[in-house]
Amino acid sequence: MPSLYPRFILCRCSLRGSAATVVRSIATSLVAYFGVCVVLGVAAFSQAQRSRGDGINDPALDARVDAILQKMSLEEKVGQLVQYSAGQPTGPGTGRSDYGDMIAKGQIGSLFNVIDPKQINMYQRIAMEKSRLHIPILFGLDVIHGFKTEFPIPLGLASTWDPTIIEKASHVAAMEAAADGIKWTFSPMVDIARDARWGRMAEGAGEDPFLGSAMAAAYVRGYQGSRLDAPDSIASCAKHFVGYGAAEGGRDYNTTEISEHTLRQFYLPPFHAAVEAGTTSLMSAFNTLNGTPASANPFTLKQVLRKEWGFKGLVVSDWNSVGELIPKGVAIDGAAAARKAFVAGVDMDMVSSLYHDHLQALVSSRQISAAEVDDAVRHVLRVKFALGLFEHPFVDEAAAPKALYHPESLELAQTAAERSFVLLRNADGPDGKPLLPLANGAQNYAVIGPVGDDSSYPNGAPPGSGPRTTLMGALVARVGQEHVARYKGCGILDGSDQEIADAVAGARKADIAILALGESPEMSGEAASRAHLGLPGRQQELLEAVARTGKPIILILFSGRPLTVPWAFEHVPAVMAAWLPGINGGPALVRTLFGDVNPSGKLVVSWPRSVGQEPLYYNSNNTGRPPESTDLTHAPRNIEERYVSRYIDEQNTPQFPFGFGLSYTSISYGATKISADHLNARELNQDVGTNGRTVVTAQADVSNTGSRAANQVVELYVRVQGASTEQPVRALKGFQTVTLAAGERKTVKFELRGDSFATWNDRNQLAVEPSKVMVWIAPDSAHGTPAQAEIVP
Ligand code: NOJ
């Protein structure tokens, strides 16, 4: 993996752009000189363009789009901008169900939540056979961590720190969904999430814009493949544009206040990366952003997205986010809501029906222009053409199931799960050695807790028809039924004294107790904000009761967010975050517990000690009163200890920092060195945003000082001091995974360029300013020995 992944992506894109320019000018010259070859030359050029898979950016689409646009009535044009959910709803209903009639009249451009390929074909047949212009319907769905082969939730996938795994997993999702007739996924969610109360943290790549950008691009590449019109590619939709993750109080759908500086520095980069990677669409968010709802926000949707980034694709609203402009108070009626959203740049209205109800009248009354409607329709049609929907509108119903659960897909789901686990603690067991990994041998296990043997919980999605093995099932397969006893102990939210007593008695009989505790899948994701982040229900009580037996305990946490369980981190020897690990989570866990796999996942969100610390993120500003040398483990005892930026009843630091994750071996890091200690701001600035040359190399020795081979995610952080805006105490600017044999030492190198030191300045421009910089190559965001350099004017 390249050390500076988003730069690599930029590089691919700009090469693609310049190659296209060269090909285009050669083609133009040929046409001028050899008139007779015009037809052949153009054909070859257009073939070359298309074979590079330019997707919606393919200029050859313009003519096709305009040809059909010319024939369309206003009603049909508006129809392309209208989308409904025609299956299991994922939000409050609309009351409509006459989709067949509407499609026949050309009044619908897209449907979603239709999963049965027969039903998909049924609707598509109406569009292709009964509507006047035979424009196919675009079918969408929230395919967010796999279609039927469920991968770990995105938060878990990101914990692999491996964009390649994400790309492969999303390609499997695309293949399965496309075979079912779904050609558009509302994924990836690239919202920066700094607050574990927000349940949708589960759906994204965590708190960091650099990592989030790498993951965003990987999802897009995986879904869209090398050609959008390939049978196993689907269109991606980066969501929710923008700032949704900053919902106040972590409460879903809540309002957000984000300065332009912070928006550009933290929240926009993953969207930009998705656009650079060629995402076909973006979804406008629910949140109000600095007073203007994101689904009616011309600054983000037009200025940033279209003008600054040159996005040519489709913007769809979120579920009724156009209608929600009314309760938000920025529109007094449906017509005003439709006008505001449309004029701001929302092309397609998901569910609210307000575009259907009002756009034609708004054009007639000249409140919106016909030309703007044409542009929005172009965005929709480009996607349909780029996907090859006009050529292949129908799905092969018989073939659809054959795409599901391929052995390679299931294996990938298992590997992804194994790579996603984060080992948080591994203290010594009774033999004086770390409790994990477990020894193979005739030990007896008690599997305790609500998650241990429930096939829906570990997967983070309602059970499909696929093969599933629970933690319990996988353990039985490994050590034999006679060595495993199962005690539920309690439910996720409920439980009786008797159940707890039975589990305690069971633990007493066993050699080792494995506690599988956490949240149910419905406790994270959309509309699942939590004000308390501890173990729900009676699970903490169960944990403490089992621990009192004195038996060695392994705690496996299943959740869509970090959980505040400080007691466990003090008293339970081994704790692992398993997130919601997908269809093969059970076997992946057992292989990890027994050391077939050495855990290598690292946190992509700061793990809080208590909910009062939220929002909590490593890349924060320092404040003018950093506590630095103050001991925060007790309440302030004097003025020096009090008047600093702190809580009087909690530490500032997280339980575990961003980037943290243990393995079964020990890894040590040498001091960071950089190849130059004076850098030139002018030269660096020429490099910003260009994927230019390496200006400095940072390196550190990383050694495996233990006795097991390991994959180690090595992280590179930068701090800039003295610039015109206050910069975070650290910012991730590179990462790579190195494999280290037992006892092996490697010198790990990172290349740094202009972008590595560029910050958003006091005029909201990305630039390198004269400053002092520190560079860490480190195991996580809180450790490492930095090198220093000066950036001179
Ligand atoms: C609302 C969610 O916010 C969004 O992420 C999802 O794609 C749509 N519903 C469609 O289900």
Image (spheres, grey):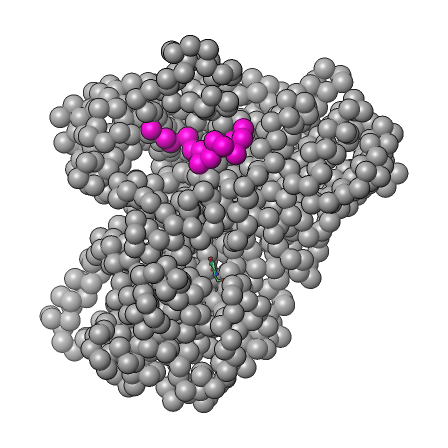
Is residue 568 among the parts visible in the rendering?
Answer: yes
Is 533 rendered above or below residue 567?
below
Residue visible at 26% across and 74% down in the picture:
373
For residue 549, side relative to residue 375 (left or right):
right
Q: Position of residue 480 (x, y in %)?
A: 84, 40
**Magenta stretch: includes residue 128:** no
Q: Quadrant of residue 75?
A: bottom left
Residue visible at 47% across and 31% down in the picture:
613
Residue visible at 23% across and 31% down in the picture:
725
Q: Quadrant of residue 774?
A: top left
**41 and 80: which is toward the camera:** 80
Q: How many marks?
A: 0
Q: Quadrant of residue 791?
A: top left
Is residue 423 among the parts visible in the rendering?
Answer: no
Q: Position of residue 704 (x, y in %)?
A: 54, 21
Is 147 rendered above or below residue 571?
below
**311 and 223: which is toward the camera:** 311
**Magenta stretch: includes residue 612:** yes
- Which residues, given as a range, are shown in magenta? 606-621
The quarter of the image holding the C terminus is: top left
Magenta span: predominant SS is: loop
Q: Position of residue 746 (x, y in %)?
A: 46, 22
For residue 416, side relative to residue 635 (left or right):
right
For residue 295, side relative to residue 768 (left or right):
right
Q: Position of residue 682 (x, y in %)?
A: 14, 31
The quarter of the image holding the N terminus is: top left
